[in-house]
Amino acid sequence: MIVYEQNVYEPVERYYFRSSNGKTPICELARTGDGWEVLFYRGATHPGPHPYRDFEHAKAHIMRYLRPREAELAGDPAPWTTAGNCDHLTTIPRDAVQRPRRTRRRYR
């Protein structure tokens, strides 16, 4: 899935588009004057800048380009994608799992 995010501490309004499985952005969409410019970091033969008049039109073009190419443009995997990988763990058979003994509480 392609996601876009904004760093609110930057002086210019700028959005970074990346794969949800990658940690580095693929391209950026920045406001320039009264329009927007797209600059690709990887993947495109012409990195840009590509000028657009409005944000929604630029975002639609970026998404149309990135969705079919997401797997090849994802870049370095994000740390949270490898953290849930439990292939190296062996499973315990269900009958080998012992349940805790139930004890009756006595109230004094």
Image (cartoon, rainbow, N blue to C red):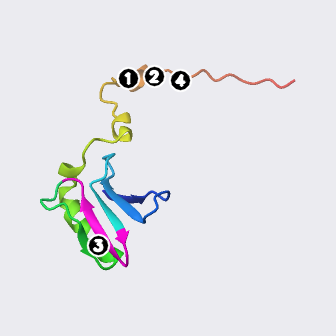
Quickly name the residue at label 4.
Answer: 99
Between the residue at mark 1 and the residue at mark 3, the CA separation in whole angstroms equals 51 Å
Sequence-wise, the earlier of marks 1 and 4 is 1
Q: CA distance from mark 2 to mark 4?
A: 6 Å
Tag 3 residue = 58
State the mark number for residue 97. Answer: 2
Q: Give me the residue at 46% from left, 62% from top.
A: 11
Marks 3 and 2, Cα distance to the nearest angstrom?
A: 55 Å
**Is the Cβ of the residue at disc 1 closer than 8 Å to that at disc 3?**
no
Location of residue 104 (image quadrant): top right
Element class at badge 3: helix
Position of residue 20 relative to residue 87, above or below, is: below
Q: Which segment did they paint magenta? A: 31-42
What amino acid does circle 3 point to?
Ala
Image point (30%, 29%), residue name: 87
- Measuring from the top left, give residue 58's x and y in whole percent: 29, 72
Return the disc, 3 or 2, that comes first in the chain's sequence.
3
Residue 89, placed above or below residue 78: above
Callout 1 environment at 10 Å: few (<14), some (14 to 19), or many (20+)?
few
Q: Is residue 97 above or below residue 26?
A: above
Q: Looking at the image, is mark 1 or mark 2 earlier in the sequence?
A: 1
Task: Give the residue number, with chain letter if any, for mark 1.
Answer: 92
Among the two numbered marks 1 and 3 on one chain, the one whose residue lies closer to the N terminus: 3
